[in-house]
Amino acid sequence: MKTLITAYSGVLRGERPAEAAHSENKNGGSALSCEGSGRWGVACSVILMCTFCTDCWPLAVLYFTWLAFDWNTPKKGGRRPQWVRNWAVWRYFRDYFPIQLVKTHNLLTTRNYIFGYHPHGILGLGAFCNFSMEATEVSKQFPSIRPYLAKLAGNFQMPVLREYLMSGGICPVNRDTIDYLLSKKGSGNAIIIVVGGAAESLSSMPGKNAVTLWNCKGFVKLALRLGADLVPTYSFGENEVYKQVIFEEGFWGRWVQKKFQKYIGFAPCIFHGQGLFSSDTWGLVPYSKPITTVVGEPITIPKLEYPTQKDIDMYHAMYMEALVKLFDNHKTKFGLPEMEVLE
């Protein structure tokens, strides 16, 4: 089966003025795990509000007071206590699939980076495991590089959930945050953006390696403006852990998904994994399939305060070529046939 790079007209284009690589409420970019996070965020908010009706209401008042003063912390990289990233449960999570991180080149600590993560899959489990925790020892593989996994900014408006996300080094995927991390926190910072976002998640299914990239140029424009090197990253097996109902173009289900993507920032997917105790039953537990995330060679990007469309197109083409090369060089190592091509 051929791997498709799907042109999707609704995804961020380089010429748009809002160049913050996938604005969360316009183009659906980097909609990483938004369905699951959203449910947990709503649950945390409801529980906290119910606390006002108990004898513990002073605690809720104190938290919301502190929240008002701490509101902008996620935009500055948040808090990332190392002991949370090193929880033992993350190693069990890694071994369940299993998930591994493969480094192909060293990264200079004197540069900043934007990792383009492909494909999104349903929940982006490879990105979560490799970059928001130390289960695959990302800090040892890339010494002195601080990874920040970018998620929809709406997740950071939910009480309690925001604290958990920040503890893993997860940040909002918006212009202010990325500008701050890549221009005001020195060097050695790496933002991981799931480039295809919600549009890409809609085509996620086992046996298919489809990435939405052709018209996604905002992250390239952002890299040029900040002088951050681009690093193509491909996760083999990301699409294998869940099965999804794919709605054809023109079907009412696809229309609903696109409306959600356009106005809310993510597209609801109808998917399933296995049951809690058996892989022969349906449930929300992901299938135990290996996920291997390969980090490619960085592409050196010059700093241009006002990049032209020609500049953006040139480096975008270089990025796509590098991603194809990364895929071709590693596909047979992870179960794909030699004839598999990236178009």
Image: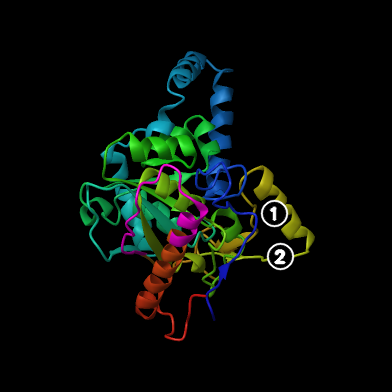
| Quadrant position of residue 78 | top left
Q: Residue at x 39, y 46 (%)?
A: 304
Res 124 seen here: no
| Quadrant position of residue 38 | top right
Vertical arrangement, residue 179 with respect to residue 55, above or below: below
Q: Is residue 100 left or right of residue 128?
A: left
Q: Which residues are magenta?
A: 294-314
Q: Residues within 10 Å of mark 1 (few under 14, many from 20)?
A: some
Colour setup of the view: rainbow
The residue identified by callout 1 is 257
Amino acid of disc 1:
Gln
The residue identified by callout 2 is 247
Whether pointer 2 and pointer 1 mark residues with C-beta atoms closer than 8 Å, the reply is yes
Question: Of residues 286 and 13, which is closer to you in this image?
Answer: 13
Q: Is residue 163 left or right of residue 297?
A: right
- Check residue 100 for magenta coloring: no
Res 294 seen here: yes
Amino acid of disc 2:
Phe
Secondary structure mostly taken by the magenta-highlighted segment of the chain: loop
Vertical arrangement, residue 258 with respect to residue 23, above or below: below
Vertical arrangement, residue 114 with respect to residue 251, above or below: above
Q: Residue at x 29, y 49 (%)?
A: 88
The picture places residue 210, in percent across and down from the top left corner, at: 54, 69
Q: Secondary structure at mark 2?
A: loop
Instruction: Give the distance between the C-alpha atoms of the residues marked 2 and 1, in whole angstroms.
Output: 9 Å
Sequence-wise, the earlier of marks 2 and 1 is: 2
Q: Residues within 10 Å of mark 2 (few under 14, many from 20)?
A: some
